[in-house]
Amino acid sequence: MVYMIYTGFYIIAALFAIHKLSTFTKINLGIIMGLMVPDLDILFKYLVSVPGVHGGPLHSMIFSFFIFISLLIAHELNRHRFNRKIINGLFMGMLIHIFLDILISGQKILFYWPLPMGAVDSLFKFNLGSEIFYILSCIQFLMFRYSGYRLILILTKTKYICKFSAKYINTISKFMRIQLVLFIIFLIMLILKIQFSTTLIDFSMLLSISFALYFLNMIKDIFNKELIIG
């Protein structure tokens, strides 16, 4: 079963909250990235079969703390490459994602991994059919497309225009088109009742998240306390 059905909603909700309550600082950039990171462990379910479990090691509070400490050490070794505010935001975003999944994922979470302790049950369980899961998964591509739109707004409004800004905008535009194409393809498959592959959707979303994280890291230098999205 596809389980990355909430990530896009988490990201959009965070962008909306930042727009209404704050400015787009580096720590907020880290939070957006952190909201995506836990779902990179989609590969876990293909390597280890654990029925009824949502996610893998990146949904573990303990492993998230280990990543946080490792990045802080990396920051001390190379302060130019590893920004402390982004690291703090990344950790916060991962925790927010994990606790939201505990609330609404409807599946067990490997909260204590790698300790020999049982998975934590989701507080609220929703009996969604496979078709609803499929539709929600398709919507994620639109969420990523909208996130790309917000990034373009940020790039066009910042005072710190660099020689790569046009290239960044062009790349994000291509990313947005790809997300729209993926959405349309999977939607047509649903309408025509073509048997769909959850593995194909999983890896399509994995690639979308990976690209978004890579790009956010590449443009991290434009985020500053004066930049306001609106």
Image (tube, helix red, strand yellow):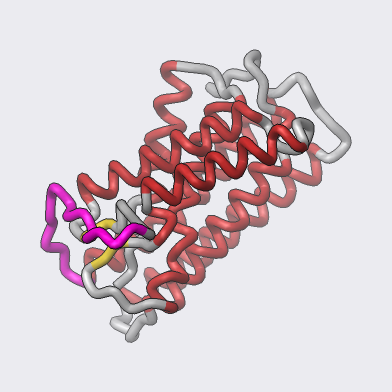
Q: Is residue 94 magenta?
A: no
Residue 168, above or below 133:
above
The image position of residue 150, as x and y in percent, is: 56, 36
Q: Residue furthest right?
A: 163
Between 90 and 69, the one lying in front of the other is 69
Q: Which quadrant holds residue 133?
A: bottom left
Between 183 and 24, the one lying in front of the other is 24
Count the numbered circles shown: 0
The image position of residue 30, as x and y in percent, is: 55, 35
As drawn, is 221 to the left or to the right of 22?
right
Residue 16, above or below 126:
above
Q: Is residue 124 magenta?
A: yes
- Residue at 30%, 52% (x, y): give it: 111
The stretch of residues the image draws in magenta is: 115-130
As drawn, is 77 to the left or to the right of 65?
right
- Residue at 45%, 62% (x, y): give it: 41
As drawn, is 56 to the left or to the right of 23?
left
Q: Residue furthest bottom?
A: 195
- Residue at 56%, 27% (x, y): give it: 27
The image position of residue 198, as x and y in percent, is: 37, 76
Assign the N terminus to one quadrant of the image. bottom left
Residue 67, above or below 227:
below
Between 87 and 1, the one lying in front of the other is 87
- Residue at 22%, 64% (x, y): give it: 132
The image position of residue 43, as x and y in percent, is: 47, 71
